[in-house]
Amino acid sequence: MLHFPVATHVVLVLTAATLFYAALTDLREYRIRNELILVLVGLFLVHAVLSGRWVGIYSNLGTALAIFLVALYFYSNKLMGGGDVKILTVAFLWVGVDCALPLAILMLIFVSIHTIVAKLGWIEVERVDGRMRIPFAPSVAGALIGTFMLGCMEG
């Protein structure tokens, strides 16, 4: 099986930069552009080929589909935005079953911190129907980058 460690690390750095940009965009505009999601999917495919992880890609696709269906339920009940569904799905596409737990734990940590900071009024948030609207992409992006740093994406 071919493996290109330097190239896979370059793809992870490009992915982290894209995630950072998506997080900033969501913080400012409460939107995540479809183009960014497509770039993240494309980077995943490139990484899967370069790292040799393409062999287990079905597991990643299944994990992403399961998360998408759960997130779609929350979206249909207006508890989550469409961009949140997209970024969450692509994050779980990246990690698959093998690294889903570290991603979920890191997301819990980042979401908790973001929520506390918002409730304390240290950052601005939108209010819709008396509820806080907090962008989710920064927490997902931070958690996915943290998962990369933990070494879960090694081929």
Image (cartoon, rainbow, N blue to C red):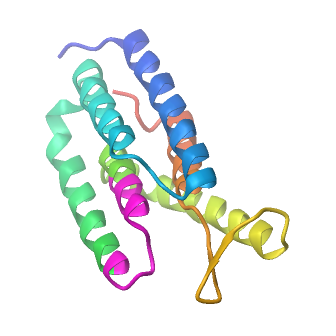
Residue 92 percent location from the top left of the image: 35, 52
Horizontal side of residue 92 vs 79, given as left or right: left
Task: Decide whether the magenta segment is chiefly helix, strand or loop.
Answer: helix
> From what the image shows, is residue 11 above or below residue 116?
above
Q: Nearer the viewer, residue 7 or 27?
A: 27
Residue 132, located in which quarter of the rendered image?
Answer: bottom right
* Residue 83 magenta: yes
The quadrant the N terminus occupies is top left
**Residue placed farthest to the bottom in the image?**
130
* Residue 106 magenta: no
Horizontal side of residue 132 vs 68, given as left or right: right
User: Residue at 27% across / 24% down in the picture?
Assistant: 46
> From what the image shows, is residue 10 above or below residue 108?
above
Q: Nearer the viewer, residue 115 or 59?
A: 115
User: Residue at 37% across / 79% down in the picture?
Assistant: 74
User: Residue at 45% across / 30% down in the picture?
Assistant: 15
Residue 72 percent location from the top left of the image: 29, 73
User: Residue at 48% across / 33% down in the picture?
Assistant: 18
> From what the image shows, is residue 54 above or below residue 136?
above
Q: Nearer the viewer, residue 28 or 91?
A: 28
Residue 62 percent location from the top left of the image: 18, 56
Residue 61 percent location from the top left of the image: 19, 50
The quadrant the C terminus occupies is top left
**How many marks are shown on the rendered structure?**
0
Residue 20, located in which quarter of the rendered image?
Answer: top right
Residue numbers of the magenta segment: 74-89
Residue 126, located in which quarter of the rendered image?
Answer: bottom right
